């Protein structure tokens, strides 16, 4: 079991409603001294419980770094992070499933590590597979599934950790457009049904506008927050709607200015 899927920063199951996720002046440098590389520069951000926030920025601007700090996988260099008592789970572009385990066992493994008994594990895994619409696929192995279905399993496994804060690092980046659209719908439904808080990282502007309550734009490295866009369009949105395309165009212009400023 790698840290990737571990219950990375879970607060004790206190039953209390989680508070906001707070990043206060968060900086991250890799290495020390002259060769140190500043990946993030004083990032401050509050995320309300139940909010869906998209972090958008060019490749290398520190998006994955930010998620790993929130997950507690890596220490901050400056500032502080409070996950507000949320239980945290992460999901990546690569589903990182265990190839020798069936789909159901892949979902169960998180519960097994928490000491959940066999009967309860089986029942919960079946319910989670139903949630991600994979009923009947529990006995399959990952290689028998399509890329979209494998990401559904990864999502079920993330939910199996009883998480209420989902950190998603370009989870649909490797999928074709049609599959990705369907998974956007599914994720939105599950986010609502389970009152999840989501921090979703992407470099796809339309995807950010399709999904987010807010889109946070990061600068090129070192990542700083340069602008924030509220998305008050009704849900569910369509990624190819004029409204989504319109706001995406505005954000893309802003992002382009930022990227070209650094390319000189
Ligand atoms: N463990 C690490 N050690 C050294 N440098 C790193 C490490 N992780 C990321 N970086 C550097 O930090 C910067 C931000 O990386 P990353 O967070 O992966 O960006 P993004 O996810 O936005 O593409 C990059 O320049 C990357 O090379
Ligand atoms: Mg990344």
Image: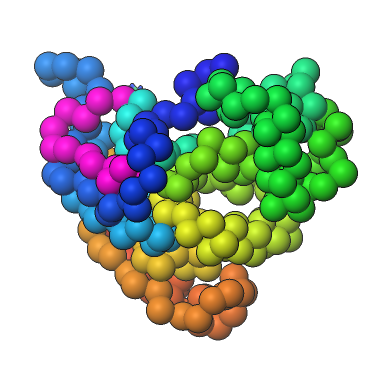
Which residue is at the front of the view, 20 or 40? Answer: 20
Q: Is residue 31 visible?
A: yes
Magenta stretch in the rendered image: 74-86
- Please give the name of the residue rendered at 42% of the width and 29% of the height, measured from the top-left corner: 8
Q: Nearer the viewer, residue 31 or 34?
A: 31
User: Is 170 colored magenta in this rendering?
Assistant: no
Residue drawn at x 22%, y 18% as measured from the top left: 31
Residue 96: image x %, image y %? 63, 28
Residue 34: x %, y % from top left: 13, 18
* Relative to 239, 73 lies left or right: left
- As drawn, 48 above or below 83: below
Tell me if residue 105 comes above or below residue 185 in the rendering: above
Q: Residue 211: give x, y in percent of width and height.
A: 51, 64
Q: Is residue 151 visible?
A: no
At 57% from the left and 17% from the top, the residue drawn is 1
Q: Nearer the viewer, residue 12 or 9?
A: 12
- 168 vs 135, left or right, is left
Whether 82 is among the magenta residues is yes
Q: Which quadrant of the view contains residue 188?
A: bottom right
Instruction: Give left or right: position of 235 versus 52.
Output: right
Q: What main secondary structure does the magenta stretch of the protein show? A: loop
């Amino acid at each position: 079991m790698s840290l990737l899927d571990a219950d990375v920063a879970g607060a004790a199951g206190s039953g209390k409603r989680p508070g906001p996720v707070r990043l206060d002046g968060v900086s991250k440098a890799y290495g020390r001294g002259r060769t140190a590389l500043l990946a993030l520069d004083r990032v401050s951000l509050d995320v309300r419980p139940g909010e869906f926030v998209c972090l958008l920025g060019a490749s290398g601007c520190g998006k994955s770094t930010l998620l790993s700090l929130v997950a507690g996988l890596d220490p901050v260099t400056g500032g502080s992070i409070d996950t507000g008592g949320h239980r945290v789970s992460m999901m990546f572009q690569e589903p990182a499933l265990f190839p020798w385990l069936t789909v159901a066992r892949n979902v169960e493994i998180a519960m097994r590590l928490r000491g959940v008994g066999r009967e309860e594990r089986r029942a919960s895994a079946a319910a989670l597979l139903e949630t991600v619409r994979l009923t009947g696929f529990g006995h399959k192995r990952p290689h028998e599934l399509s890329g979209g279905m494998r990401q559904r399993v990864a999502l079920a496994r993330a939910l199996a950790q009883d998480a209420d804060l989902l950190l998603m690092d370009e989870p649909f980046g490797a999928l074709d457009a049609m599959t990705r659209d369907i998974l956007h719908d599914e994720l939105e439904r599950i986010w609502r049904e389970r009152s999840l808080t989501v921090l979703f990282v992407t470099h796809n502007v339309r995807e950010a506008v399709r999904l987010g309550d807010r889109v946070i734009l990061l600068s090129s490295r070192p990542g700083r927050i340069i602008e924030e866009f509220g998305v008050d369009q009704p849900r569910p949105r369509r990624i190819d709607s004029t409204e989504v395309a319109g706001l995406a165009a505005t954000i893309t212009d802003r992002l382009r200015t930022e990227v070209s400023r650094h390319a000189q």
